[in-house]
Amino acid sequence: MKAIVYKPGELPVYADFPDPVVTNSNELLMRVKAVAVKNLDKAKVSGKHYSSATDNGLRVAGSDGVGLLADGTRVYAFGKDGMLAEHAVVEKSHIVRVPGGLSDAIAAALPNAIMGSALALRYRANMQAGDTVLINGATGFTGKMAVQLARDYGAKKVIVTGRNEKILQSLLQLGADEIVSLKQGDDSFVQALKRMHADTPIDVILDYVWGHSVELILSVLKGKGTFSQRTRLVTIGAMSGDTIQLSSQILRSVDLQISGSGLGSWSGEEVGKLFSEIIPEAFELAANNKLVVDTFEVDFVNSAKLWQEESPNGKRMVVVIP
Ligand SMILES: NC(=O)c1ccc[n+]([C@@H]2O[C@H](COP(=O)([O-])OP(=O)(O)OC[C@H]3O[C@@H](n4cnc5c(N)ncnc54)[C@H](OP(=O)(O)O)[C@@H]3O)[C@@H](O)[C@H]2O)c1
């Protein structure tokens, strides 16, 4: 079969690859029709993701695909590797039926953003209706989903940060209440957030950026020695760097819970709910036009050449496989 194949640390190429084989009763063969290419796939191919393969073997890229099972059922499937190919072996426990009315492209693109928003909001931040939610890096594909879900889950206020001014403005239509640009100077960024935090204390912070912007956000939370409510900060991505300086004084001055949401941090039960409830719910919302999901399609043969291109304006690239 044809596939997009790579060795960790090298760029992927369009090439021939042996057909995958079902090896046990928990697996199914899927004819792949559409695959979303995300930061996770790029990080795995680069060899820099914590879940990247450590051997030098040739493998198929891509982890989120939509396709047809042998009986014609159209499903979304999450695979650790191996989706960017004409055929893939998928696990029965990691598939979701795609409802009519939802395109292959949207069904392929949505689940990773749902993992990166719904799981963080529900299981790491334990978000409650009435919470004030700050989304750092809301201008990306996943951040845009987080804005919509935070609103859907009953947030009192949604504050968003990002660099892209045009997308920041567009987030007001998706459910954001306040915009804070990451492009302004540190002092004005901190002052703007301090005003908002004093007005409506921030309960939940979802972070896709990490690095310096999170150091600034933590300085906003720093207390003065009196009682404070708990703020739950969840790191989901690290677009501007993997480390921060963490002040002991800040941790002692506020009731702050810091956690992460990603592959490996979720329990088996949480992953089970993701496939049985959370992704199906998101598919229904999208099929009924209640979620805005921006994708653009590229053809299979050329997709490897586009590997290093940045997706424009928070849109997700989806590879269409004929
Ligand atoms: N753990 C999980 O379950 C999970 C799931 C999904 C995604 N993620 C991670 O979350 C992050 C965002 O994913 P995505 O799908 O939203 O990506 P995306 O659509 O490619 O968007 C990238 C985002 O990162 C921002 N950004 C990039 N470099 C930056 C920098 N130096 N400083 C500040 N902002 C920067 C962009 O801001 P502007 O456009 O405003 O410049 C944009 O908001 C990635 O690290 C991804 O791997 C994790």
Image (cartoon, rainbow, N blue to C red):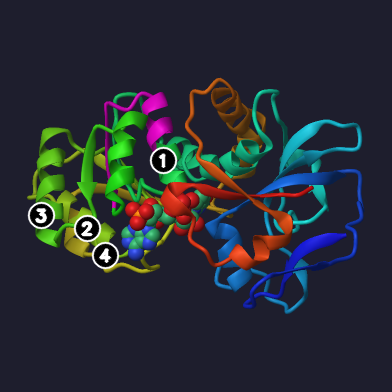
> Residue under circle 1?
144
Q: Are marks 4 and 3 in contact (CB under 8 Å)?
A: no
* Chain-order first, disc 1 or disc 2: 1
**What element does badge 2 sit on?**
loop
Q: Which residues are magenta?
A: 147-162
Which residue corresponds to the image point at 47% horizontal and 32% vertical from the top-left?
Answer: 292
Q: Position of residue 122 (x, y in %)?
A: 46, 35
> In this orientation, does residue 209 appear?
no
Q: Of the residues shown, which amino acid type is indicated by label 2?
A: Lys
Q: Of the residues shown, which amino acid type is indicated by label 4?
A: His
Q: Of the residues shown, which amino acid type is indicated by label 3?
A: Ser
The residue at label 3 has a CB less than 8 Å from ligand 1: no
Q: How far apart in space, not on screen, are marks 1 and 3 (Cα)?
A: 24 Å
* Residue 158 on the magenta segment: yes
Pointer 3 local density, CA inside 10 Å: few below 14, some 14–19, many at least 20: few
Q: Is residue 27 left or right of residue 311?
A: right
> In this orientation, does residue 288 appear?
yes
